[in-house]
Image (cartoon, grey):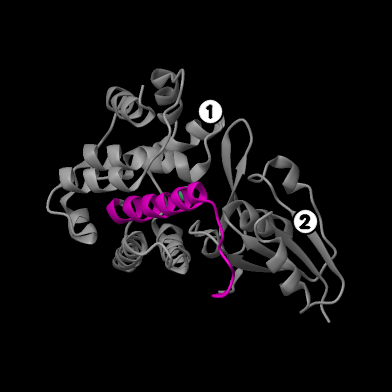
């Protein structure tokens, strides 16, 4: 029997124990926050590294596994199970290359995630899909993934029992960004996370409607069944309920966003003035 390091979150501990029965010698590691530089130093002598949980758990498993076999069992829509990189959070956000893990879908995982976590991950996957769809680096294949992902997420919002739809959508959107990468929304979200401690999906979700409004990209409308950008923005704002940021400094954040070249991979160029306006709306400042 193979030995395994099983990485999980508080929510997935019970399921991790179930998976453990398939292995000999098992070690568990509970992850409570996104990977930091410390995780890069962790080594394992186990044959397999398994990550069961959301983006933080799976990114941690991808980093620790290095050249060992890595199995990802996603429980959110982060898409981390299908991308060849992991995000490391320090004072700045960095990305490290990893192998793409082996994806394992478990339909019977009880997903009793808090409403806030579901909102965060659903909007992260929507941001992946929207950015990938309008990206200058999009291909026919990546756009197909985006269409399907958005369809599933909107289906989930019509029937919130079906959480597995979000996981499927997240994996499709992850395959899309593995091709096109993300652009302006993700670049803008990173300083909200590093400066204000806002979790990744929430940061993307706060920004998403306002970047859609600015880009005013007709190609997106049929994917959401909307007739105008205004209608789409209204729809997304009705589906979400993100808190405001107290003491928000839009100029400082815009300065940090401008360091990312990828902000101009979207359908419309953007500069500091436009970023500040969008940030103020998103933060409710
Ligand atoms: Zn993301």
The N terminus, quarter of image: bottom right
What residue is at 36 percent from the left and 45 percent from the top? 240
Q: Residue 64, image x and y in percent?
A: 73, 56
The C terminus, quarter of image: top left
Which residue was labeled with disc 1? Answer: 196
Query: Which of the 4 image quarters holds residue 29?
Result: bottom right
Residue 125 part of the magenta segment: yes
Magenta region's main secondary structure? Answer: helix
* Magenta residue span: 106-134
Which residue was labeled with disc 2? Answer: 29
In this orientation, does residue 253 appear? yes
Q: Is residue 39 left or right of residue 11?
A: right
Q: Residues within 10 Å of mark 2 (few under 14, many from 20)?
A: some
Q: Residue 263, image x and y in percent?
A: 36, 38
Front residue of 74/186: it is 74
What residue is at 50 percent from the left and 60 percent from the top? 79
């Amino acid at each position: 029997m193979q030995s395994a390091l099983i990485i999980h979150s508080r929510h997935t501990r019970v399921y991790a124990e179930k998976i453990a029965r398939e292995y000999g010698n098992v070690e568990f590691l509970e992850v409570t926050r996104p990977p930091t530089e410390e995780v890069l130093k962790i080594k394992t002598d186990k044959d397999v590294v398994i990550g069961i949980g959301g983006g933080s758990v799976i990114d941690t498993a991808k980093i620790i596994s290095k050249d060992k076999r890595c199995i990802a069992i996603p429980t959110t829509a982060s898409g981390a199970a299908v991308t060849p990189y992991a995000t490391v959070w320090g004072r700045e956000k960095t990305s490290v290359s990893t192998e793409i893990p082996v994806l394992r879908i478990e339909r019977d995982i009880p997903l009793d995630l808090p409403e806030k976590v579901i909102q965060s991950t659903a909007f992260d996957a929507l941001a992946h899909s929207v950015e990938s769809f309008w990206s200058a680096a999009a291909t026919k294949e990546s756009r197909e993934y985006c269409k399907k992902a958005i369809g599933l997420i909107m289906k989930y919002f019509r029937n919130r029992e079906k959480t597995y739809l979000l996981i499927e959508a997240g994996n499709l959107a992850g395959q899309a960004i593995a091709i096109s990468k993300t652009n302006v929304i993700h670049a803008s979200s990173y300083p909200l996370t590093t400066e204000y401690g806002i979790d990744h999906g929430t940061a993307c979700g706060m920004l998403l409607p306002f970047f859609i409004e600015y880009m005013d990209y007709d190609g997106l409308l049929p994917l959401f069944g909307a007739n105008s950008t205004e209608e789409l923005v209204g729809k997304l704002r009705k589906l979400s309920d993100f808190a405001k940021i107290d003491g928000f400094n839009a100029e400082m954040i815009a300065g940090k966003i401008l360091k990312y070249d990828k902000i101009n991979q979207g359908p419309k160029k953007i500069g500091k003035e436009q970023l500040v306006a969008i940030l103020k709306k998103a933060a409710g400042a």
